[in-house]
Structure formats: structure tokens, C-alpha cells
Image (tube, rainbow, N blue to C red):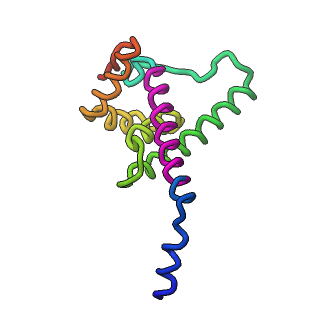
Amino acid sequence: MIDWLSGLGAAATWGRILFGAGLFVVSMTVSFAAIGIAMVKLPSNYFSSHYESDFLPDSPWLVRWGAVIAKNIAGVVLILLGIVLSFPGVPGQGILTILLGIIMLDIPGKRPLESRIIKRPRVLAAINGLRLRYGKPGLILD
């Protein structure tokens, strides 16, 4: 048992530590950038009950369904990533990443879940502050 523990210290070289720190910074930057772009590009009335959307309405059916499948896969990946980012010590915006993943999914009953997340005062204030910084109106909620 002690031999195993002493082997752990030898495995932590400066190269591995720098690689881990670099991965930390890259993942945090990519997470912030993706969430920021999505929240700024989102229509201001997306969370309103009057919002209706049809994904790629003028595309051929094969292109449309391929894009819908890819969008749903990306949504699941973002939800899983958001769960990981929610753990203590992991950098990134876990709740906003989960919200972005849910927005991308085409599942029944997602609106109430989105509303519960977006109506958190700190989440709404962060998103509206970001949108106002880029000249977009704040989100409209019902």
C-alpha cells in the first residue's frame, strides 16, 4: 500500500502539472465562449410562451433531420458537460451549460425545466447583463 502511494508523487511531473493547468484554462475559456455566444444569439422572447420555432424550415428533409439529430446529440453532450462543470473544483458555468444543452434538445416538457433555471435571479441577471453588453435586449419571461 505504501509503495503505491509513493508512486503517485513520482507520477506528478512538471510536464503533467502544466498540461493539467493548460487543459483547465482551455476548458474554462471554451465553456465561457460557447455559453456567451449562445446566450447573446438567443432571441429575446425565447422563454416567452408565445415563442414558436421551426428548426431549418426551408431545408430539404434529409438536411433538416440530420441537423436536428446533430443538434440533439450536441445538447446531450452539453448537459453531461454541465453536470461535470457543476462539481466543486471544476472550472466553468455548470448551470448555464446545462441550460444551453436543454435549449438544444427537442424533448417534450423542456419549457418548464428551462423556465425554472432561467428564473433564478443570478442566472437571469448574468445573461441579461451579457446581452446588454452586446447591444441585445434582455430576455422576456412570462
The image quadrant that residue 54 belongs to is top right
Along the viewing direction, whichever of 29 and 67 lies nearer the viewer: 29
Magenta segment: 19-42
The image quadrant that residue 71 belongs to is top right
Which residue is at a point 55% across and 59% down the rendered structure image? 16
Q: Position of residue 34 (x, y in %)?
A: 50, 32
Left of 20 or right of it: where is 45? left
Along the viewing direction, whichever of 55 and 12 lies nearer the viewer: 12
Identify the main secondary structure in magenta: helix
Question: As displayed, is residue 4 above or below residue 67?
Answer: below
Which residue is at a point 52% across and 21% down the rendered structure image? 53
Along the viewing direction, whichever of 4 and 137 lies nearer the viewer: 4
Number of marks present in the image shown: 0
**Residue farthest to the left, as pictured:** 121
Q: Position of residue 24 (x, y in %)?
A: 48, 48
Left of 70 or right of it: where is 16? left
Which residue is at a point 31% across and 22% down the rendered structure image? 129
Residue 30 sits inside the magenta stretch: yes
Which residue is at a point 58% across and 38% down the rendered structure image? 72
**Quadrant of the rendering where the C terminus is positioned:** top left
**Residue farthest to the front, as pictured:** 14
Q: Position of residue 128 (x, y in %)?
A: 32, 22
Q: Position of residue 63 (x, y in %)?
A: 73, 27
